[in-house]
Amino acid sequence: MTRPKGWAARGRLRGWGGVTGMAVACAVTASLTLLPLAHGEGTLGGLHTGPGATSAVPVKADEECKDPEASLPASSADGPSIEKIRKRGKLIAGVDQNSFRWGYRNPEAESGTLEGFDIDLVRAIAENILGDRDAVIFRAIPTNQRIAALENDKVDVVVRTMTINCKRAEQVAFSTAYFQAGQQVLAPKKSAITGYDESLKGKRVCTAEGSTAYDALNEKSFGAVFEDEHDDTELDEDQLTVPNQLDCLVRLQLGEVDAVVTDNALAAGQAAQDPAVELKGDKPFTTEYYGVAAKLGADDLVARVNQVLAEYRQGGADSPWMKSYRTWLAEGLPGIEGPPAPKYRSN
């Protein structure tokens, strides 16, 4: 009998965070489709790169795109996008429900409450526009559907650890940056992999489809195997390039891949979920910034989000940004003293 690929690996889940691994595996199916999570009732809702971090594999930029992090000036003015949200009475936000500490369901909370750093920001946007931080329809979207969800008017905004870059800026409109992150390697603690270097040669590395991690490996892979090559003996589903970055952790736990390349901010949460894995390398090998994404042309909404972010950053150690950071991220990403400074376009 020919066993499907990964059969033997499934027996190795024990010792890889067993219960955690199984729980994560169950969560993957839910993350692959776009579905409403809540309608606003109740509350359903070393790793620091630092300002001097350098990029060994910089995100490629078109010659015409000099500074993708520069966004529209902050404004509280109304416009068609704002009026549409107000008429509906709800902000529809595309989020993650599986990224620990960013956007995830808390199994210990009533009704599986959505919580995390990104969720706090969504609620701040809803409060500014609608006067109610619970006036949100959350929709879970996988990594590779973030842009499509905006283009097809499934969501008003995407707040889902989405890196700002020139390629994406041609497809969606970004706010100013609200978090600095970078790509890093996640692998078993006992692995011989030492980071984003020659130790990846011949190793099977998982990334999410449409992610900056995939782009980085495509630029320089160090001999890693990161693309699926199907033949008649293989499963139809990809093992190395997956719809959602969390799927890579499941592949790693099952022994189907040797390492994951993803944002260090997300990887820190995954390492917290599974004590058998860790971030490899002293620091990220890229410098990237997360932004809130909206549909191209929704300038009034982007400007309003930038106004929300301007207020969110104010107050130093007592700012809403720092309070959310201390609640969700400080344990896994210590030493961050504040959010990245906003950049605005001059015209």
Image (cartoon, rainbow, N blue to C red):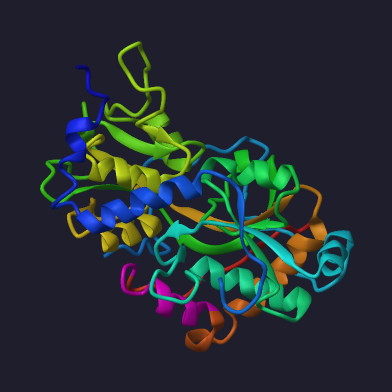
Residue at 32 percent of width and 57 percent of height = 270
Read off the magenta span.
Answer: 321-333
Q: Position of residue 177 (x, y in %)?
A: 58, 61
Residue 169 visible: no
As for residue 221 lying within the magenta part, the answer is no
Which quadrant of the figure contains the N terminus?
top left
Residue 179 vertical position relative to residue 325 in the rendered view, above or below: above
As for residue 323 lying within the magenta part, the answer is yes
Residue 108 visible: yes
Q: Position of residue 251 (x, y in %)?
A: 30, 40
Residue at 47 percent of width and 61 percent of height = 180
Which quadrant of the figure contains the C terminus?
bottom right
Q: Main secondary structure of the magenta part?
A: helix
Q: Decide if residue 93 is on the left or right side of residue 29.
A: right
Q: Decide if residue 159 is on the left or right side of residue 155.
A: left
Q: Quadrant of residue 330?
A: bottom left
Q: Quadrant of residue 247?
A: top left
Residue at 38 percent of width and 25 percent of height = 227
Residue 310 vertical position relative to residue 236 in the rendered view, above or below: below
Q: Position of residue 318 (x, y in %)?
A: 51, 88
Residue at 27 percent of width and 58 percent of height = 20
Depth check, front residue: 23 or 231: 23
Residue 224 vertical position relative to residue 332 in the rendered view, above or below: above
Depth check, front residue: 193 or 342: 193
Depth check, front residue: 163 or 257: 257
Q: Position of residue 324 (x, y in %)?
A: 48, 78
